[in-house]
Image (spheres, rainbow, N blue to C red):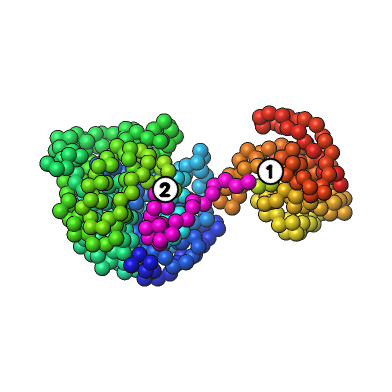
């Protein structure tokens, strides 16, 4: 059953520059679909309350987290009570200062004008989407779903019906359901009631009951629950008073706290957050657990203080045949801390295979080139002739990059930034570029350095890149300068070097021994 492909129509277009969004009005939910990066049929995956926080914070923590990476095209479905209507929307390109996307100044947005993401959650969702067709939605009355009065906030049964409505809307006959935190009770009830539509159930950091009862000492008493609801209403969206509780790894990060407080304000009103907290306090699905008859994985972090690990053990012991995996860590939210372990367990459970996380760092040889005296030459030739000469230069550089298997990362004015998986090829490419462009009457300087680079989408970054740029600036016209690392790595290749001595590179710690390639 776990290997069954999703019977759902269509994968969405893969765009390098934009996200494509549509709004489908139907039943009061917001759904975002992320395409599998490899575009292969796989599991239908439904994240119930993917944005949920701890168990006392249902509505307010059902916030809109949507990936902002340009490599992950997506379609979001906002489902409302009106007749079916579809409208395209083209998002603006937003800056991402300090690693976080910044939402616009608006309260409780119901449209695609809000497109916010925590980078760690974006990575988490991309990884899930790499082996599934992934849908996640904002629960009724929260996030991008239609607002309702506090008196009309959905019961647990209505939330379960909403899961079915979402599946119908996106064309899922069956789905594996991933339910973190307070979404777990909704998913448990759905899986027990609709096993014919549930291929698997994955519960992360969730609980079976919100109230402290004999035999279940981990809930809150009614007075404790009321005090918690009042605290949510008083401080919601203003102070991250629970960050240490839900995300200890981010407790000292003021930028994250500010960003998250703003996100709360966009997710739900304080009153709705408090009302849903009270409703969650009344949840009790303990008697339903033995009726769950679908393959179930229960994940729980040992140090989770928002929902203690004993609650995960309780659930796993009472669902027939459930697999229980206890994880290290204390972050309640699955995309923080060692998220790769969570993802590996989910992937293995659903597909039978466990793929390692995609590396975010790689060893590469970086090349920088630029034309010496380009400003003076442009003034001498005039705009049109200089543009023609620059086009010839670019054609030569790209031809040599292709010949030596270099990858163009960026081009700025008269300079090129490229990366290679082999230092000897990089050196030979740089020399070939310098020699070839000399036929145009141009002098090019080049710098090469090998180091660990950060992968940022299709680009590379990090201190190794900055080092190479500073090193290239030291080169003379027609010269290819390399770091000692490059020289040592090409030993035995027949490439010869001239020692250019010890230099300090602006903004780069330490002293660097530089070498010029003997041409």
The residue wearing badge 1 is 450
Bin the neighbour count of mark 1 within 10 Å (Cα to Cα): few under 14, some 14-19, many 20 and up.
many
Q: Residue 326, image x and y in percent?
A: 33, 45
Q: Secondary structure at mark 2?
A: helix
The reply to whether dot 2 and dot 1 touch (C-beta < 8 Å) is: no
Left or right: residue 34 compared with residue 227: right
Q: Which mark is residue 341?
A: 2
From the top left corner, tell me how far across and down residue 62 is, in percent. 31, 48
Secondary element type, mark 1: strand
Q: Residue at coordinates 63% horizontally, 38% vertically from top-left?
A: 463
Task: Say which of 262 and 324 sits in front.
Answer: 324
Between circles 2 and 1, the one closer to the viewer is 2
Please tell me in which quadrant of the rendered image residue 78 appears. bottom left
Q: Earlier in the sequence, mark 2 or mark 1?
A: 2
Q: Residue at x 44, y 56 (%)?
A: 354
Which residues are the magenta region?
Answer: 342-363
Distance of label 2 from label 1 (alpha carbons): 30 Å
């Amino acid at each position: 059953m776990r290997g069954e492909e999703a019977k759902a129509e269509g994968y969405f277009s893969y765009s390098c520059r934009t996200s494509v969004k549509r709004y489908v009005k139907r039943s009061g939910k917001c759904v975002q679909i992320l395409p599998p990066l490899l575009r292969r049929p796989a599991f239908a995956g439904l994240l119930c309350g993917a944005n949920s926080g701890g168990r006392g914070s249902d509505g307010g923590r059902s916030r809109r987290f949507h990936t902002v990476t340009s490599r992950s095209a997506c379609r979001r479905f906002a489902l409302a009570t009106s007749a079916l209507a579809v409208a395209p929307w083209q998002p603006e390109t937003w800056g991402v200062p300090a690693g976080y996307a910044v939402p616009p100044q608006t309260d409780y947005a119901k449209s695609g004008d809000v497109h916010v993401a925590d980078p760690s959650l974006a990575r988490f969702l991309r990884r899930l989407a790499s082996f599934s067709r992934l849908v996640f939605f904002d629960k009724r009355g929260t996030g991008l779903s239609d607002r309702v009065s506090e008196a009309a906030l959905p019961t647990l049964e209505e939330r379960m019906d909403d899961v079915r409505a979402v599946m119908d809307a996106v064309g899922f006959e069956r789905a594996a359901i991933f339910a973190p935190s307070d979404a777990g009770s909704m998913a448990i009830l759905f899986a027990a009631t609709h096993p014919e539509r549930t291929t698997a159930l994955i519960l992360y950091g969730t609980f079976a009951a919100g109230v402290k009862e004999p035999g279940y000492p981990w809930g809150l008493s009614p007075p404790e629950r009321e005090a918690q609801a009042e605290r949510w209403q008083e401080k919601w969206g203003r102070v991250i008073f629970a960050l240490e509780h839900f995300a200890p790894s981010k407790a000292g990060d003021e930028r994250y706290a500010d960003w998250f407080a703003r996100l709360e304000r966009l997710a739900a009103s304080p009153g709705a957050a408090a009302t849903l907290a009270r409703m969650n306090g009344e949840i009790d699905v303990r008697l339903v657990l033995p009726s769950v008859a679908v393959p179930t994985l229960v994940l729980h972090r040992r140090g989770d203080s928002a929902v203690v690990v004993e609650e995960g053990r309780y659930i796993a012991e009472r669902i027939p045949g459930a697999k229980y995996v206890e994880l290290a860590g204390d972050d309640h939210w699955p995309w923080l801390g060692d998220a790769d372990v969570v993802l590996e367990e989910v992937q293995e459970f659903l597909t039978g295979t466990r793929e390692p996380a995609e590396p975010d760092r790689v060893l590469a040889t970086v090349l920088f080139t630029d034309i010496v005296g380009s400003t003076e030459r442009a003034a001498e030739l005039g705009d049109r002739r200089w543009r023609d000469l620059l086009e010839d230069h670019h054609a030569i550089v790209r031809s040599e990059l292709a010949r030596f298997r270099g990858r163009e990362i960026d081009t700025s004015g008269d300079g090129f930034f490229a990366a290679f998986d082999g230092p000897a090829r990089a050196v030979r490419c740089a020399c070939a570029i310098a020699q070839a462009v000399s036929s145009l009457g141009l002098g090019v300087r080049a710098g090469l350095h090998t180091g660990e680079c950060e992968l940022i989408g299709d680009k590379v970054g990090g201190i190794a890149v900055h080092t190479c740029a500073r090193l290239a600036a030291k080169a003379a016209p027609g010269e290819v300068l390399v770091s000692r690392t490059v020289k040592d790595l090409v030993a035995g290749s027949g490439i010869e070097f001239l020692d250019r001595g010890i230099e300090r590179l602006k903004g780069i710690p330490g002293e660097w021994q530089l070498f010029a390639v003997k041409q």
